[in-house]
Structures are given as C-alpha cells and as structure tokens.
Amino acid sequence: MLSEVRLDQPDLSLRQLAVLLVVYQVDELQTVRGLAAQLNVARSIISRALDRLGDFELVARQIDPGDSRSIIVR
C-alpha cells in the first residue's frame, strides 16, 4: 500500500476506493448491481468507478455465465 502512495499516478477517489475495498474484502463474487446496492449508489456511479479502477488494472469485469445481463467484478 505504501508503494502505491508513493507512485506518481492519479489518486483514487473515496468512491473508487470504497468500491475496490468491497470487491477485495468480500469473499463472494460481486456484481455491478450488488455493489450499487451495498454502497447505496446508482449503477452508473459504480460503472464509472470500475472504469477508472480498470484503467489502473485493479479490477476486471466479465459477463456472468449464469446471467448474461449481469457483470461480475473481480
């Protein structure tokens, strides 16, 4: 974590950090819909946060094989 703080890259917002922490700390698979419900925000907000986290290669999204309308976040 300390090495991330020292890097000369843009910082994560509190919202992005909250999304990242939920994905990292919760053992079960997370979906965009589930993250939005847990954090009590709109799915579009989660999508924007995931876009940014994906830019930093901190998360990856994939279509849920059981439900093609759902996106799994890892």
Image (cartoon, helix red, strand yellow):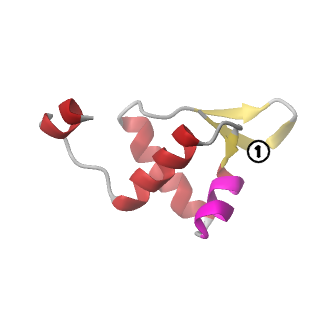
Q: In this view, does 54 lie to the left or right of 26?
A: left
Q: In this rendering, is residue 7 above or below 41?
A: above
- Please identify the quarter of the rendering in which residue 5 is found: top left
Rendering coords of residue 22 (x, y %): 55, 48
Which residue has dot 1 on it?
70
| Picture residue at 13% right of the left edge, 36% below the top | 6
Image quadrant for the N terminus?
top left
Rendering coords of residue 19 (x, y %): 50, 51
Rendering coords of residue 52 (x, y %): 39, 46
Q: In this view, does 43 lie to the left or right of 19?
A: right
| Picture residue at 55% right of the left edge, 41% below the top | 25
Please report the bounds of the magenta region as a residue range.
33-40
Image quadrant for the C terminus?
top right
Q: For the stretch drawn in magenta, what is the main secondary structure?
A: helix
User: Relative to the observer, which residue lies in front, 24 or 58?
Assistant: 24
Asked if residue 8 is among those painted magenta in the image, a careful observer would answer: no
